Amino acid sequence: MVRFNREVSLVYQYLPIGAEILYQNSQPLIRWGDLDGDGINEVFGLYRYNNQPYLFVFKNPIGSYLSYFPVSKAVNKRAVRVLKEFFDTRAIYLFPAPVREIGGKKWGYIDAKGKFVLPPIYGQAADFQDNGIAVVGLKDKYGVIDEKGYFIVKPKYDTIQFFSEGRSVVNDREGFKVIDESGKEITEKAYAFISPEYKEGRVEAAETDAQGNYLYGYLNKRGKVVIPISYETASEFIEGRALVKAHGGQYQMINLTGEILHSYPYSWVGNYGQGLLSFKKSNEGLYGYMDGEGNVMIEPKFTFAGPFSDGHAVVSLEVNQKVQYGLIDPTGKFVIKPNYNQILPLGEKRFAIGKEIDTKQACLRSIFALADQGGHVLTGFIFHKIGSFHDGLASVSDDQHTYFIDKQGNRMNQLPYVSGNGFFSFDKTLIKGDIDQRLMYFGQNNQLIWKQAAACQLSSQYTIVEHKYKPNIDYLVYYPEIKGNKSLADVNQKLKEMAGVKPIPSTSLEAQYTGDYEITYFKKDLLILEITGYNYPFCAAHGMPIKKYAHINLRTGSLYQLNNLFKPGSPYVKVISDVIEDQIKSNDEYSFIFLNEYHGIKPTQPFFINEKGLNIFFEPYEIAAYAAGFPTFTIPFNELIQLIDVNSEFWSAFH
């Protein structure tokens, strides 16, 4: 590893600024050997630059320096073969997969045959990255594991971003920090904010001033401030340049050392791409484009101006009091006229053009067609989702199915074609499908390797079977059915109703609804199911979450309410109300509660049971802001035991 570290540092001196050595299993993809037969070893490997992989071959790895030298195609082929063998032997072919269990969903990792290699013990599990490590969640905290499941970073952070350029941004109660691939915190202090991803050896970081305003600067890969934190705004670096706004001053283009390359006397500047920036002369003005030196290339005339990519940019105009999107070339000429509700760049010179499903509701979802950069429409308006193109393929969803298309819009028959809406992606040796909020994996020959199980065994007698209800593309509900006792037929019907199974028109709706469930508790005869939902009106700022609990006696088929836990006539409402009020006043954890909005609980207050005791919760907006979700208060049973009816069917069901 010492030799690797030395060679990595040497190689970086000769790579483009912002290039990143590729890693596999925490080892850099660098090898050495005599490729050309002259008796002197070469150093060769792979690096990433501007999101593209490249091969390098250098001479003289033993000395204190490296040197470029011309290589033949044969040498290149030998280097690629050696690296491929190295990659194949070191690659980690593990894939995150969830399992429904009592207590909630758990994640583990399967191999390419669909067998669990790392057991499902995590609350969350991200993909393994090229560096051979993965981010996992455990007990509401996040850590990092290697391919054997050993913790490189124990679960202690609130979030851990994917590693970029060998670094990850994390945050905890102190703030945002940067760690390296060994888990070491390389920042000397916590910041108010750090951007999630390193680009070209830099990442934006922010602190707050005395007035609470954010000021931005840049950290290098050592976690040190390399460009002072003094800007009102700061963009990521692209091709060695970033756009910043001086505190109280002008927009500026700076290089990787913070040197000012140009200043711009405009009210707004942004969206740098392929040497052009969009700008506005006044806050109320229209958008145009200028080059990096400030020369106006396209006069301001757009209501929106996106970054240039693949020689084109998405812009909008107001047409008949309606914002419409089109595509322009660097001269400002429309190659796709502004006739569309949306235009999405897909990469590889392809675009998704969208029109409204309902012209009376422009904020409703678009229906998309595929177009090329010349403005040629290649398909009908049939897609609800189109992913980015990679190697000539993109994942799409229409009304009924998800599949791959080529750059002409033709379905790839040899690749997966499944019922439901979502996305496919290539993941190492498998194809991952996230379809109707369920995960599945296919082999390259189109065979199904693994999918989430639709049943959960509670005991030798009882099983919970999952059913899907999808009468409309905008309405998706998963609901449980309990098997093992015929007397539970009425309970199962009630669960369907609680989950949201009801008559839904087949035509487009004005809101999207998704519903799901979890098995939160099972002890003796008591089963507790959490029923969740999310209702999103398409024109709303946000949707409304829904949460309900079903407390079920599997032996008798009883469904319990809060009052069933207590002795008849007991003052449980007042006692619980007072306990919660005391928690709000005495515990800083509940400082977000609006005390003047709290008026105690209702006799039918929403609740759930777990090992900690009785949990009382409130709806969003009821006693706190929407962002607080469902404020929940836990009261141990021993604090209420004088009120609890210990001889009741409810209490006996789990005691």
Image (cartoon, grey):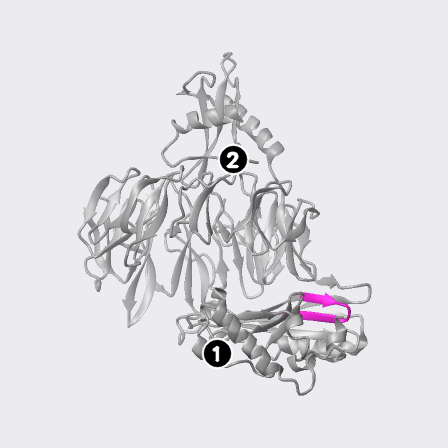
Is disc 1 placed on a helix, strand or loop? Answer: loop
Dominant secondary structure, magenta? strand
Front-most of 152 and 379?
A: 152
Front-most of 612 and 337?
A: 612
Q: Amino acid at mark 1?
A: Tyr
Q: Point out the image quarter for the N terminus.
A: top right
Q: Amino acid at mark 2?
A: Tyr
Picture residue at 49% right of the left edge, 35% below the top = 22
Quadrant of the image occupied by residue 648: bottom right
Relative to 282, is 356 above or below?
A: below
Q: Which residue is mark 1?
A: 598
Q: Which residue is mark 2?
A: 23
Q: Residue furthest top?
A: 39
Sequence order check: which comes first, mark 1 or mark 2? 2
Q: Point out the image quarter for the C terminus.
A: bottom right
- Residue 500 horizontal/vertical position (percent): 60, 76
Picture residue at 31% right of the left edge, 46% below the top = 217
Few, some or many residues within 10 Å of mark 1 (<14, 14–19, 20+): some
Asked whether residue 123 appears in the rendered view, the answer is: yes
Residue extent of the magenta highlight: 520-530
Quadrant of the image occupied by residue 150: top right
